[in-house]
Amino acid sequence: MILMDSVLMIFSSLILVICVLAGVAFMV
């Protein structure tokens, strides 16, 4: 199930990026 692993990694990294962007938006 390499496909599921890659999808999971992409999904988690996407959530991480969204959280960082939200934090920056709140800072400004």
Image (cartoon, rainbow, N blue to C red):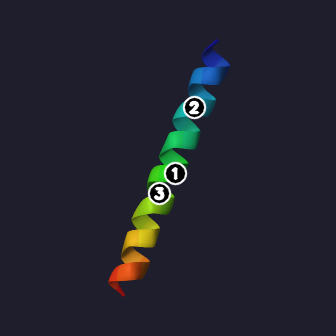
Q: CA distance from mark 2 to mark 1?
A: 11 Å
Q: Disc 3 marks which residue?
A: 17
Residues at marks 3 and 1 touching, judged by CB atoms closer than 8 Å: yes
Viewer-side residue, 22 vs 7: 22
Q: Horizontal and vertical percent for residue 18?
A: 50, 61
Label 3 SS = helix
The residue shown at (52%, 34%) is: 9
Q: Is residue 5 left or right of residue 17?
A: right
Q: Is residue 12 left or right of residue 20?
A: right
The residue shown at (38%, 71%) is: 23
Three-letter code, disc 3:
Val
Q: Horizontal and vertical percent for residue 15?
A: 51, 51
Q: Disc 2 marks which residue?
A: 8
Q: Is residue 24 left or right of residue 11?
A: left
Label 2 SS = helix
Three-letter code, disc 2:
Leu
Viewer-side residue, 22 vs 6: 22
* Residue 9 sits above or below residue 22 on the image: above
